[in-house]
Image (tube, grey):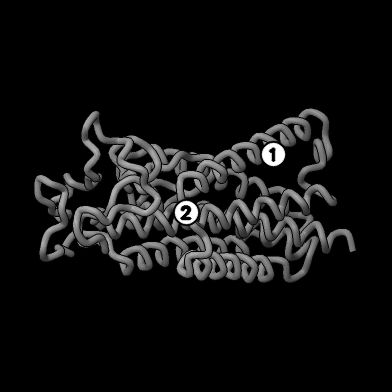
Amino acid sequence: MRSSNPVFSRRGFSRDNGYAGFNAQPQAGGAAVGTQQANPYAQGNPYAGAGQQAPTNPYANNPYAQQDLQGAPPQTPVTTGRMTMDDVVMRTATTLGTLVVTAALAWALLPVDDANIGKSYGIAIGAGLIAMILGFVQAFKRKASPPLILAYAALEGVFLGVVSSVVDNRIASGAAMQAVLGTMAVFLGVLVAYKAGWIRVNRRFYGFVMAAALGFILLMGVNLLFAAFGGGDGLGFRSGGLGIMFGIIGILLGACFLALDFKQVEDGIAYGAPREEAWLAAFGLTMTLVWIYMEFLRIIAILQGND
């Protein structure tokens, strides 16, 4: 399990020591019964060697994900030390709570009036850059580091607090609350659609989302370079009609990454992932929600700024 930010790769879909989320059946307390009930998205286990088509538990080394030599789940599921949905909810609430608190403090303590906006912007950009670095560090770590994740959330909160204050007070009154409501609506909508089976997360879905996200990020990077060297908004991808269109695309991509996050959480619980993996789930969900919030905030700023 790794972060959901489109910049980062996902351990859940790789060939490393993470779980092969779409290619093996749950082994430790999952819903599978019998050796024939495999993942409906799997076409055999591509991670097995020649002649080894039996699904394996990628968390076999976790002492709490017990299994026999045939890969069958234990008769009595072991829950101690394994990730549960309560763990994911609590860790996510802690991470988002840290972000919200620091965002509120930044909003209150870093004024954005004409006399102080330069200083506040500088602090926000510095916090955002450090948060990005911490995000990359955690994304490439093999294990979750709660202090690192909480530090990322705190610094990201400072950045969001100042940016939200600027947009809300100087461009579009009420934009921050509207962006929060929009982000919550997307989260709940994707959750309902995922649980109802309307969104089927498989390898094709994953490949499409990653390709679309890569193209989106490359376009935004090119736009940023043109803006840095040519001034203005570069190619115009972040303002006006094009800005609104790309903002909507960004929100849709964020929704797709939420579906991938939900799948990874579901697989981690089914496979008997160790409890500390819940911090990675919280980290990924937080990054995705920040992504969606920023896209909403920008769209609202464009719409109200043109009134």
Q: How many labels does the image show?
A: 2
* Residue 52 image position (x, y, % from top left): 21, 35
**In which quadrant will I find the C terminus?**
bottom right
Q: Mark 2 falls on what kind of element? A: loop
Q: Front-most of 8 and 66?
A: 66
160 w.r.t. 204: above or below: below
Of pointers 2 and 1, the one earlier in the residue sequence: 2
195 w.r.t. 297: above or below: below
* Residue 151 image position (x, y, % from top left): 43, 51
Q: Residue furthest front?
A: 36
Q: Mark 1 falls on what kind of element? A: helix
Q: Mark 2 points at which residue?
A: 201
Residue type indicated by callout 1: Met
- Tell me how far mark 2 sits from mark 1, CA to CA: 26 Å
Q: Mark 1 points at which residue?
A: 220
Residue for point 36% across, 43% down? 43
Name which quarter of the figure residue 77 lies in. Answer: bottom left
Q: Front-most of 209 and 140?
A: 209
Residue type indicated by callout 2: Val
